[in-house]
Each structure stands twice: as structure tokens, then as C-alpha cells.
Amino acid sequence: MRSATMVAIAATIGNLLQGWDNATIAGAIVYITEDFDLGSSLEGLVVAMSLIGATAVTTCSGAISDWIGRKPMLIASSVLYFVSGLVMVWSPNVYVLCIARLLDGFGIGLAVTLVPLYISETAPADIRGSLNTLPQFLGSGGMFLSYCMVFGMSLMNSPNWRLMLGVLSIPSIIYFALTVFYLPESPRWLVSKGRMLEAKKVLQQLRGTEDVSGEMALLVEGLGIGGETSIEEYIIGPADELADDQEPADKDKIRLYGPEEGLSWVARPVTGQGSLISLVSRQGSMVNQGVPLMDPLVALFGSVHEKFPETASTRSMLFPNFGSMFSTADPRVKTEQWDEESLQREGEGYASDAAGGDSDDNLHSPLISRQTTSLEKDLVPPASHGSVLSMRRHSSLMQGTGETVGSTGIGGGWQLAWKWSEKEGGDGKKEGGFKRVYLHQEGGPGSRRGSLLSLPGGDVPAEGEFIQAAALVSQPALYSKELIDQHPVGPAMVHPSETASKGPIWAALFEPGVKHALFVGIGIQLLQQFSGINGVLYYTPQILEEAGVEVLLEDLGLSTESSSFLISAFTTLLMLPCIAIAIKLMDITGRRTLLLTTIPVLVVSLIILIIANLVSLGTVLHAALSTICVIIYFCVFVMAYGPIPNILCSEIFPTRVRGLCIAICALVYWISDIIVTYSLPDLLDSIGLAGVFGIYAVVCVISFIFIFLKVPETKGMPLEVITEFFAVGAKQVAAAKSE
């Protein structure tokens, strides 16, 4: 956890620079306007040029990051910050300043778009929300430091706006050093390019453990897009009474396998309907939850989270006694460390990933394979799935330290397993195939619910021996049906490098799950911007000046500009403890709950601000109410509506198209930002402060309705499970509409 946190903090320096720039231009534009004698339109253009640059770079940043990686794009961001700072120091006229602001926007666009993506792909599922709130925290911290600097300079006889803007180059050097020498590449991106050895090493560094087998298997499974997914329920118990080559005696039972040798369970399908099945009928149509227009996907996600009010735990909640109950390996036997030479001596027949240095070419064996021995090599594998599937202890890709507890835990109480299923083909022959299974325990720890009574034959197991679990079942990402007769191997038969995308997978954007996720991502980004945050952010000094804030500080002998800068600095300082609370709650109460709780506060603060500007309350009271409302608006906004749209967008898209989809959402974000920021000076001139904030209040109300009806809760869930839910939910909704 510590390694992942430090990596997230280092990556978030880019957002600190963004916050620094936002606050600096908000202060410097006052002096730039005086120096160059700018009109309101040109003044808005100077501020908006960074947004134009961010928009331009966002159009291609996602596709390029999917091609060359996340780390090179973050390095490019730091370089652009540095160069733009130097050019702003030199700016002899407004045109050169606009070019510098454009370069600055390039750096901002890369950082804002890719830092949440990078953190989501490197962070453990249980603390992903908290770590992804750090960009908001450091961004606000950068604003506070910048406002302090601007306030100090405003006290000078001749404040130098070039120096204000140029200071940006100094912290950008630190950001460059961190991106080059400290940040690793995203393990999910590495897996998508078939660079399994590098991905394994990065995961070991981030997780602080040698055993990353379960998560490596999860990342490979995350490469799939589309496919048929079903929701099933099982009663799951230990398989240690069965040998590897034995099938369960009860034909109603199946065996589930984890990514390591010795990890398997016996599962029996539940005939009744649990919490997930009750939402999705076996015919595939979504059940109406009683709320008109609410997306059934929201209820589907919610059915998981209501069982676990607090998922911010590193310990898997499924199979709590995993090491003793569900492991068939003898815990007294130490797992040996194998290398290339020992594999050859024992005749394993699989190449080690140590062979050939750091090359991935030798990793052609699957994540799960049958353990052959010298005596078995000449034997024809029986049809039994028990003999076809056995765990690879000796592959160093999946090699652990002998501690198998929780190795299949993938976060938020979810487990990854596979099952072998057979069906009769058209010619009467039996055909087999592997299925990927994401498992989630239903009910709290120790809960044994009524579904146990629905077991065939009424065989109710003893307390504590079996667990009820919901399952998302679908085809493995790298399963090749043509190869099943050539090698007795399991999922991930094809090496990821052989299936890696050669470019953006545009066709994947039309997959139902991806389209549904894009609708949610685009919608929340659009509404967030039109709630007015960046317009208020860039023009806070002018807004406070119009509200008469100098009245509150006239005893200090400060100018109007200095007073507004001081209050802006105070406001951003108050943001920091609010964001700290959000960091704590993001993975406990969740994203959706925070949004639905804080947006009404935004609406109320805006309404009070409107009243204060429409009713004559006296100079002091008017200035006090306006200042308090702006402070409340900022502080509450950064607790939820500020960071959560970016967090959600970094979570809901499949690995192979995550960069591309986030770029689309970010493009909407920046275009909306340009419209809001560029239009605000003219709006202030035409309809005044009350009219502007009236528009923002209406948008906040619309945002609340959209989030309540359409945005699901994603806290604590592995990214791959989230995208699987979007896929199954979207297809079930489509099926329901066609009926």
C-alpha cells in the first residue's frame, strides 16, 4: 500500500502544477489586462488559451497513451510545463503570452487526463478512490501556494505578472525528475502489450509482495472486450477432499480453479434467486426497481455494495478462512523456488520466464495449465476437467513465496477463478470450454442465508463449511478454442503479445458496455463543468471584488486586488481539510453517496448567493454573504463533484480502450470548460453575478437528477469487474427494451 501511495503522490505533482497555474492566472490576469490594455474578450482569450491547448492535446492523448504508454505522456507533460513557464517569463506581447499559455495547456491536458487513469491502473482496488482524490488535494494545495505568492507580490509597488507566471518552471523540474526516475509504467498497460515480466515486477514493487499471481491473472483477463456474461449464484465449499484427477461425486457440482496450484473449490449452482439474480432474471431482462427512469445498472451495482458497507480492507471478504479451508495444498509444505535449470531437470516442459534474460518470448505457457510429469507425458489426457486443469506452481509468472492465502483476492471481496464446462455438440460429441468467474460473497462475513435451503436434495452443509457467492461468468480474455485439442491447457492460452492491439480499437466503442460507460462519463463531465466551478475558479478575485469584499478588509489597508487575493488564498486553504475528509470517505461511503450528499449543499449556497445579490442587504452584509457562499461552494465542490467525475471515468472503461475513452470524456470536459470560462466575463457584464450563479444552480439540480438515475457506485471493485458489470448491465437493458 505504501508503494502505491507514494507512486500516486508523485504522479499527482502534475495536478499540483495545474492548480498552481489556475490560481496564478486568476491573479495575474488583473495586471496583464492593465499592462496590455485588454478588452473583456481578449482577457477571456488569454485565460482560455490554456484550455484550448488542453482540448487540442486531449484529442490525441488517449490514443497515444494506449500506444506508447502512460509514463511517456506524463514525462511530456512535465516538459511542457517547464517550457511554457520560461516563455511566459519572456512574453513581450499578448500574442507570445497566448502561445505560452497554449503550451501550458498542453501540459495541463496531459496531466488532468492521464493522472487519474494512471492512479486507477496502479492502485489497489480497496484504496483506489482515496488515491484518486489526491489530484484534487494537491491541485488545491497548488492553488493555495500560488495565491499566497500572488498576494505577496500584490503588495509590491509594481507587481510583476511575468514572474508570477514564470515560477511554474521551478516545480516542473521536480515533476520531470519524478516521472523519469521514479514512476513505473502502468502494469495494466504493460500486460496489454504482452510485457508480462515488466508488469510482474511493477506489481511486486507496488504491492510490496512477491506473490502477485492473482492480480496478474486478473490483468490478463481485463484485456477482453465484449462477450457474453451471465450472473450466477453458487454455494461454494472446500475441494481438499478430492484429488486433482477426480470429479465431484455429485454431478450438480462443478470445480472452480484459482491461478495457483492447490487453489480450487467445489461449487453447486443455487436454484433460488439471490440479491444479484433477483435484479437480472435468467431470461436476461432487468427487473424494474420501482424508480421510474432509474438505470437498472445502478441497482445492480448497489446490490453488491449494500452487502459490504465498508470495503476499504486489504483482506478478502470472500473465503475468510481461505488458507485453511479452501487450499488443497499442505500448509506445512514449503513451495520451492524453481528456475530454468530445475525445470529442465524435472522435465516440466514449460520454459521459465527467467530464460533469455528479460525477454517475454518464453512466456507462451498459459496462466493456468496442467502439471505434467515424466510419467504422464506419453499418456492421453482424460476428458475429465479435473485432469485437464491443474495449477502452475512452478511458473515464475505465477510463482509465489509459499503463502497462498488471499492470492486470488482481487479487491473489494472479489475473487478470480475459472471453471471447465462441457456440452454436447451438434455431432453428438461433447465439447468443453473454460469460463472466467468473478466471485463475490453474498451477505456479511459469517452470513448463511436462506439460499442454502435451495440446494438440490435439501443437503444443508454444516455452519461455516460453505459460502454463498454471486458470480459473473464469461469467456476468458485470451482463450483460443482452436488450441484446445493441441495442448491440455487452461485460460490465457495465447500470449497477450499475440493479441495486443496495433492501434485504437474504434470498433470497441460500439460495444454495449463501452457505450453505456461513455454515456455516464460524458454526462457527468459535461454537467460538472456547467455547474460553473472553473469559471468561478479563474475569476474568483473579480467575483469577490464585484461583491465588495474590500469592505471586509478595509481596516487592514489592503487594495481591492490584494483583498480578493487574500480571501482566495484563505478559501483554498479551507479546501484542504474538506478534501482530506473526502479522501477518507471515498472508499467507505462511496462516490455516488458523496455526490448525492454534497450537490444539494452547492444548490443552497448558490441560491443564497443569488438572494444576496438581488436584495439590498447593506454593503457589509452583502459582501459577507457573498464571500461565505463562494467559500462553501468551493469547499463542498472539491469534496465530491470536483474529483469524482475523473475517478469514475478512470474506472469504467476496459483496459484496451481506457485511454481512448478517457480522452473522449476529457475532450468534453475541456470544450465545456472553454465555453464556461470564455463566456463568464461577458455574462458578468450582461446578467450580473446573480444571473451567472442562477444558471449554475439549475445545472447543479440537473446534475443531482442525472447522478441519482444514471451513475452507479464503483467503490472497492476491481476495474475489470466494473467493466464486466457495465457490459452485462447494458446488454440486459437492451434485451429488456427489445421484449
Image (cartoon, helix red, strand yellow):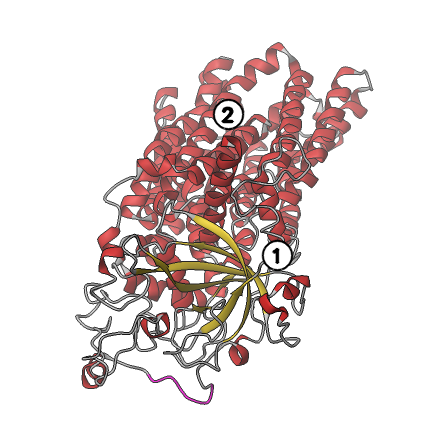
Find residue 29 and name its label: 2
Find residue 272 and name its label: 1
Find residue 234 and name its label: none
Tell me the element at label 1. Answer: loop
Residue at x-position 47% and y-position 24%: 674
Q: Which stretch appears magenta?
A: 331-336
Report whether residue 534 is seen: no
| Crowding near the residue tagged with mark 2, few <14, some 14–19, many ≥20 C-alpha atoms within 10 Å | many
Percent of width and height locating residue 676: 53, 22
Percent of width and height locating residue 556: 72, 33
Please identify the dominant SS of the magenta region: loop
Tell me the element at label 2. Answer: helix
Extreme residue in the front direction:
428
**617 shown above or below 712:** above
**Camera-side residue: 414 or 164?**
414
Question: How far apart are the alpha carbons under marks 1 and 2?
Answer: 66 Å
Please tell me in which quadrant of the rendered image residue 67 appears.
top left
Please tell me in which quadrant of the rendered image residue 592 appears.
top right
Q: Is residue 332 magenta?
A: yes
